[in-house]
Image: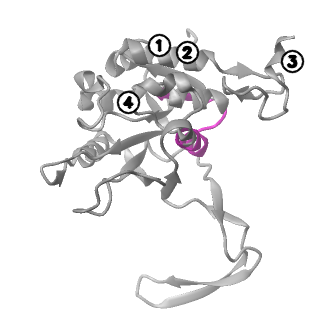
Amino acid sequence: MKKMKVNYIRKCDAVSGMLSLPDASIDMVVTSPPYDQMRTNGNAAVFDFPPIAREIWRVIKPGGVVCWVVEEQISNWSESGTSSVQRLYFKELGFALYNTLIMQPNFQRTNTRVRYGRSPQYCFVLSKGKPKTIDLIRDRKNSTAGCRTPSTFRNENGSLRFSTVGVVAEYGVRQTTWHYMTGGSHLTADEFAMPHGSMMPEWMARDLVRSWSSPGDLILDPMCGAATTTKMAAMEHRHWIGFEPFEKHYQISLQRMKSLWDCPCGAINHGTDFACGKCGATKLEQSA
């Protein structure tokens, strides 16, 4: 069997790119489609959801996970409902609606005179059967760390039962609302990528990749834009593939991937990093 090509970005639309991939060849998809007409960046012209969803279903492996990051447009006093339609269509294809995350920016400029903040940004975590990898992030500080605390559970008949858990760990699993900083350097240190205009924060892509994939897995972003997903996949020692049809964004994505540099210690570093984040060796030392 011919070995599958990996670690590349191709200039093409999502469907054309995925048609070139074998069935059940992708371990994980992390992507963010256009948010209705909020910020199309040209993508709305080629964004045809049903065939994209069907191709994702075809190429994802059993046990694979899709992270679909979306936000509702508000127009004529109503949210569009687009993300709900997409979510249910994925379910009709056979995906399990495994987890729904809310991506909450810590700062947002919005007119709050008529509603409570902006429409939330969702990450629909979809799985083709039971996820083969589950590595939940534990960064929630427990206020009762080191203690033994009683737990109360409600039985199906409404009665209570009590149990005592072990010693509470210092950190617990992150909740379904993920808080992040947005704008400028909070998105990336790659200033040349800023013209894209609607990048996913790097840490968001990184944490999604860490949660539902393993080193050596193949990560796909069929609408890769400025290559945030593929960059973080590479830095987390996963293989990667991206598709992007628009020349400006395609060139940004190529530059972003080429700027990464390897260190003999095994770490992969940002192009803007002068020293390795793992061992401290500098770029100059590696090129000497």
- Above or below 169: residue 53: above
How packed mark 4 is, by other alpha carbons closer than 10 Å (few <14, some 14-19, many 20 or more), is many
Residue 251: image location, x then y, percent: 47, 13
Mark 2 lies on a secondary structure that is helix
Quick one: SS at disc 4?
Answer: helix
Answer above or below: position of 202 versus 48: below
Tag shown at residue 251: 1
Q: As drawn, is 286 to the left or to the right of 104?
A: right
Disc nearest the viewer among 2 and 4: 2
Name which residue type carries label 1. Gln
Name the residue type under label 4: Ile
Residue 78 drawn at (x, y percent): 16, 53
Residue at image position (39%, 20%) is 18
Which numbered disc, 2 or 4, marks the residue that appears first in the sequence? 4
Residue 255: mark in rendering: 2
Q: Look at the image and tell me in which quarter the C terminus lies.
A: top right
Mark-to-mark CA distance, 4 and 3 = 42 Å
Q: Residue at the top extreme?
A: 2
Q: Amino acid at mark 3?
A: Glu
Asked whether, in this view, residue 38 is left or right of residue 192, the answer is: left
Q: Are marks 4 and 3 in contact (CB under 8 Å)?
A: no
Mark 2 or mark 3, which is nearer the start of the sequence? 2
Q: Which residue is mark 3?
A: 285
Q: Earlier in the sequence, mark 1 or mark 3?
A: 1
The alpha-carbon separation of the residues under discs 4 and 1 comes to 24 Å
Q: Residue furthest bottom?
A: 159
Disc number placed over residue 56 in the picture, else none: 4
Task: Indicate yes or no whether the magenta region holds residue 213.
Answer: yes
Region rendered in magenta = 204-221
Alpha carbons under labels 2 and 1: distance apart: 6 Å
